[in-house]
Image (cartoon, rainbow, N blue to C red):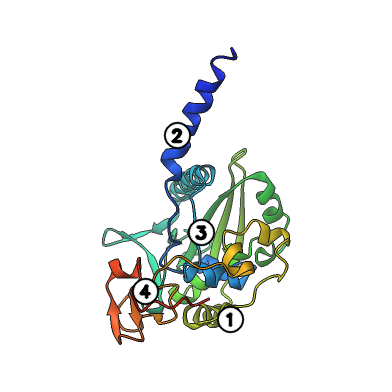
Amino acid sequence: MDDFLKPISETLIDEINAVETGKAVFPSKRLPPSKLGHVCHAYVWHTFRWSALITKNPKHARTAEAGKEDERRVIARLRAAGWKITDFVDGAQIRVETYNGHIVSEVEGVGRHPVHFKNQDVLLEVKSMKRSRFNPVKSGKPLSVVEPQHYAQIVYYMDKLKLPYCVYIAYCRDDGELFCHIIPANKVEARRLDELATSIIRSKIPLAKISTNATNHICKQCEMIEPCQFRAAPPKSCHSCFHGVASETDKGRWHCELACASIPPAVVLEGCELYQRII
């Protein structure tokens, strides 16, 4: 490429990335079940409490978008192979929703195989991944070891949907290879995840962190490192306020213990004059 054209090429890519990056925003207002399998419980607590703003990485966003397309294609192939799959009910994707709407996630599908699961619904979960993640999954090691967040997610789903098995299919986006795990429900692990979720949602102090050393390799890459390791002030919101709690009566809403009232969604984003940082 001619030298005088290179800056133009770089500018074009920067423009695309800028569209996908946007400004820093609060983390999700819901707690995804997969987060319960994260190696650091403090990280999950800080994201639920909005201890820091996050900026979307454009490469990660594009990868996630491509992964969703991969997963839809695998589900379509399962149907072609004879699976009877239910993924939408009344026009909406099947969801797992607990803790009064504070834990919400959509399920890939529930299905029956014409031979092996003829009279029994099982959970279907498809995950698209690069070869570096696919090989450990394919190695035969327990999914709870190689992909703990995936394992937590499907155990939680099976428990809430009362399903005995999950057909977990890994798709290697590098070359299209597939690998399948049949994973049984685990009531003991599901109970532990429920207890952890309760702690994350109700606790007013951060949960245990993976390390107290900010140079830990996981901590250095964490978007919550500033509030977690250095006690940086969180952005003002009702999530990061000591008086704010996840409502147990108004679905998916937040409640102010000081005002004894449900908080309007617009106010949650900004807090009020009674704000008291939780960390």
Amino acid at pointer 4: Gly
Q: Earlier in the sequence, mark 4 or mark 1?
A: 4
- Separation of disc 2 and disc 1 at Cα? 43 Å
Residue labelled with disc 2: 16
Question: Which of marks 3 and 2 precedes in the sequence?
Answer: 2
> Regarding mark 4 in the picture, which secondary structure is present there?
helix
Residue at image mark 1? 192
Q: Which residue is mark 3?
A: 125
Please state which of the two labelled residues, at mark 2 or mark 3, is closer to the viewer. 2
Type of amino acid under label 3:
Glu
Q: Point out residue 43 in the picture as x, y percentages from the top left corner.
A: 58, 68
Instruction: Please state which of the two labelled residues, at mark 2 or mark 4, is closer to the viewer.
Output: 2
Within 10 Å of disc 2 (Cα), the crowding (few <14, some 14-19, many 20+) is few
Instruction: Give me the C-alpha separation between circle 3 and circle 1.
Output: 21 Å
Q: Which residue is mark 4?
A: 101
- Identify which amino acid the numbered label 2 is placed on: Ile
